[in-house]
Image (tube, rainbow, N blue to C red):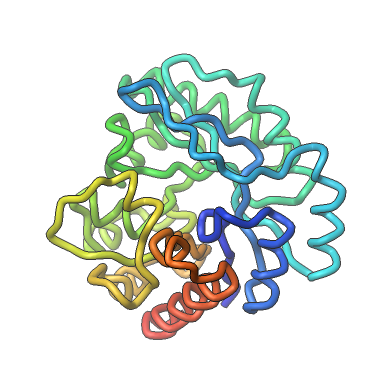
Amino acid sequence: MDIALHQVTALDIGPLELVDMAADNGCARVCIFTNAPALPTEDGGVDLGFPMVTRTLLPAFQAKLAERGLAVGNIEFFPLDIDPPFEQYREGLAIGGELGAVRAVVHMFDPDLDRGAASLARFAAMAAEYGLDVGIEFMPLSPACPTAGRAADYIRASGDGNVRIGVDALHLARSGGSPADIAAMDPSMIGYCQLCDGPLGVKSDYLAEALDRKVPGTGDFPLVEMIRVLPLHTDFDIETPLLGLANAGVSAVERVRKAVEGARRVMQEGGR
């Protein structure tokens, strides 16, 4: 099955190197950043320094994709807060459209359901101008949309059929969710899944953990059960940053290899 390598898996390399590593490990797609604002927080925002495909880098990136025979899955990320800067998002969407990306990922930071849903519908219409669907990623880091159920509320309220939920294994676990919750959802609402692993039953510095996860199959997340209940149309991304290994001197090449091999093992156990 096709699988995508997410830039977050190796933040210490650039997008061109990401394509090479994805191809070398048998991945069919990459997930990249074409827009990377500071992550909104109660303290005002955290700039995580995500490597981006900019307009300047675009020709070289397109050439690299063609050389290695890869495509682009998701482009990230577009926060929708109380007053989203929609026009500022056009350049990132345009780059994604030129790359033939599948979807643009939003994070919801507007706690007002009706207003947030209106923003989501407006963003989805803008993304559609560039041939992009929209993925909505729930996460407890965003109190406005901490669970899969809340993401579904935003989709229903927006009335847009081109918005689907991204199920990140870390966010599902830390939101108190389970594979049973995903199985109970309308399958048409689910678009993609991001694979990683980690411990259960612990409290952690969530933002730090988001950047230092475990190789799929080496932690306690019920990944196989989750994979089994996901709809067959679900796209899979490997989003497995291993900052601890990076700090210990393990190369990006080796970290990506571990992440991809682990993801393929759990996907095979899950019947994909």
- Is 12 located above or below residue 80 in the figure? below
x, y percent for residue 93: 68, 36
Residue at image point 81% right, 45% down: 58
* Image position of 128 (left or right of 45): right
Residue at image point 52% right, 54% down: 8
x, y percent for residue 259: 47, 72
x, y percent for residue 168: 38, 55
Number of numbered tags placed on the structure image: 0
- Is 25 located above or below residue 195 in the figure? below
x, y percent for residue 211: 40, 52
Extreme-left residue of the structure? 201
Q: Nearer the viewer, residue 80 or 49?
A: 49
* Image position of 153 (left or right of 117): left
- Is 222 located above or below residue 178 in the figure? below
Extreme-top residue of the structure? 83
Residue at image point 25% right, 46% down: 205
- Is 115 located above or below residue 100 in the figure? above
Residue at image point 37% right, 71% down: 227
Q: In which quarter of the view is residue 172 placed?
A: bottom left
